[in-house]
Image: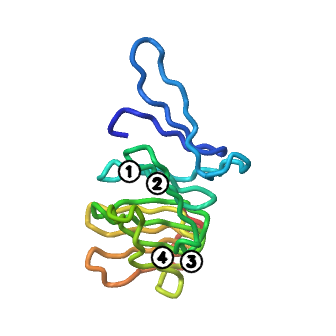
Amino acid sequence: DDSGTIWAGTDSGVFRLPVRGGSGGRVAESVDLTGSVDTPQPRVNALLQDHARRVWIGASNGLCVRLPDGRNLRFSPRDGLPGGFVAALLEYPAGRLWVGTSAGLSVLHFDSATSRPIMERTYGARDGLPDASIRSLFHSAGGSLWIGTQAGVAELPASGAGWHPYGVANGLPGGDVD
């Protein structure tokens, strides 16, 4: 992150390796993603620091955000995410977070007054995506948003004119795109 801390997403949660003064080097600190000492930490699939220095963590049990003050807030389908498995994160434009889950793509923004994300929209196969299981997100220099799914890719042009899906019929060797 912008403070020099290294964030490591693993199969057993997420760890911070903050910069230490002197010759002590870095010592890993576990970040609790469950809120319970009795629950195993989930697999971490995506990490993102946003424009406001919040660190977003996409995991097998939902979405977590680490606020600059050190608090962790957790979000799951109970809070409006379309799926509990978060595979991809992208901030574009500044302030809007795209969250790729196992059951759709959500667009949200963080409301600092309530310390909660506000869901703006969720996209799925009915909206023109090749599949609702989102694997990757990319914003191109031309302004398009590209989505990798289990059944191909889709482009949302900068104009917002709707999704353009691409798959095996367009020459991709297979449907699963990371």
Q: Nearer the viewer, mark 4 or mark 1?
A: 1
Image mark for residue 152: none
- The tag earlier along the polypeptide, 1 or 3, is 1
Q: Which residue does the numbered mark 2 point to in the structure image? A: 65
Q: From the viewer's perspective, is residue 13 above or below residue 152? A: above
- The tag earlier along the polypeptide, 4 or 2, is 2
Q: Nearer the viewer, mark 4 or mark 2?
A: 2
Identity, as a three-letter code, of the amino acid under mark 4: Tyr
- Using the numbered discs, state the Cα–Cα distance from disc 1 to disc 2 in whole angstroms: 7 Å
Q: From the viewer's perspective, is residue 2 above or below residue 160? A: above
Check disc 2 and report its element: helix, strand or loop: strand
Label 2 crowd (10 A; few <14 / some 14-19 / many >=20): many
Identity, as a three-letter code, of the amino acid under mark 3: Asp
Q: Residue at x 49, y 51 (%)?
A: 72
Image mark for residue 131: 3
Q: Which residue does the numbered mark 4 point to in the structure image? A: 166
Tags 2 and 3 touching, CB below 8 Å: no
Tags 1 and 2 touching, CB below 8 Å: yes
Comparing 158 with 114, the one in front is 114
- Using the numbered discs, state the Cα–Cα distance from disc 1 to disc 3 in whole angstroms: 29 Å
Q: Nearer the viewer, mark 4 or mark 3?
A: 3
In this view, the residue farthest toward the front is 114
In this view, the residue farthest toward the right is 38
Q: Nearer the viewer, mark 2 or mark 3?
A: 2
Image mark for residue 54: 1
- Using the numbered discs, state the Cα–Cα distance from disc 2 to disc 3 in whole angstroms: 26 Å
